[in-house]
Amino acid sequence: MRVVAVCLLLAIGVGLGGCTWVKPEAGADDVAVRSAAQVGQCERIGQTTTSVRDRVAAVQRSPSRVEEELETLARNSAVELGGNTIVADGPVRDGQRRFLIYTCRR
């Protein structure tokens, strides 16, 4: 019985590990993702540190899915601050990443 319960928990964890829980807010799809080299003429207006769960039921989530959700949260933050561009400021660590927010001419 105990083995069945463990297997069931692992199956649920793996199934949920691929899910995306973060949804873009209105306007977030218009926020550009650029590198630091691409924002030379832009005005930095703020920063945000985003975080999501990188594990579900002790199962590691897909790193690309985690990165995608962190980026979506950063785009949402940019909209709230009136920015239109984000730049990742370092790697993803334990489900967290810092982003710089800019206003750039289009």
Image (cartoon, helix red, strand yellow):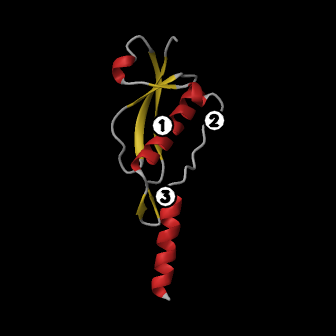
Most distant residue in the bottom direction: 1
Of residues 14 and 41, which is closer to you in this image? 14
Numbered badge on residue 12: none
> How many angstroms separate mark 2 from mark 3 (CA)?
22 Å
Q: Which mark is residue 71?
A: 1
* Among numbered discs 2 and 1, the one appearing first in the sequence: 2
SS at mark 3 in the image: helix
> Where is residue 71 shown, x and y percent of the image?
48, 37
Extreme residue toward the right, this view: 26
Q: Amino acid at mark 1?
A: Glu
Amino acid at circle 3: Gly
Residue 33 drawn at (x, y percent): 46, 27
CA gap, disc 2 to disc 1?
12 Å
Mark 3 touching mark 1, by CB under 8 A? no
Instruction: Please report the residue visible at 42 percent of the width from the left and 45 percent of the height from the top.
Output: 64
Q: Secondary structure at mark 2?
A: loop
Q: Nearer the viewer, residue 73 or 80?
A: 73
Q: CA distance from mark 3 to mark 1?
A: 17 Å
From the viewer's perspective, is the residue at label 2 or at label 3 nearer? Answer: 3
Badge 2 is on which residue? Answer: 25
Residue linked to disc 3: 17
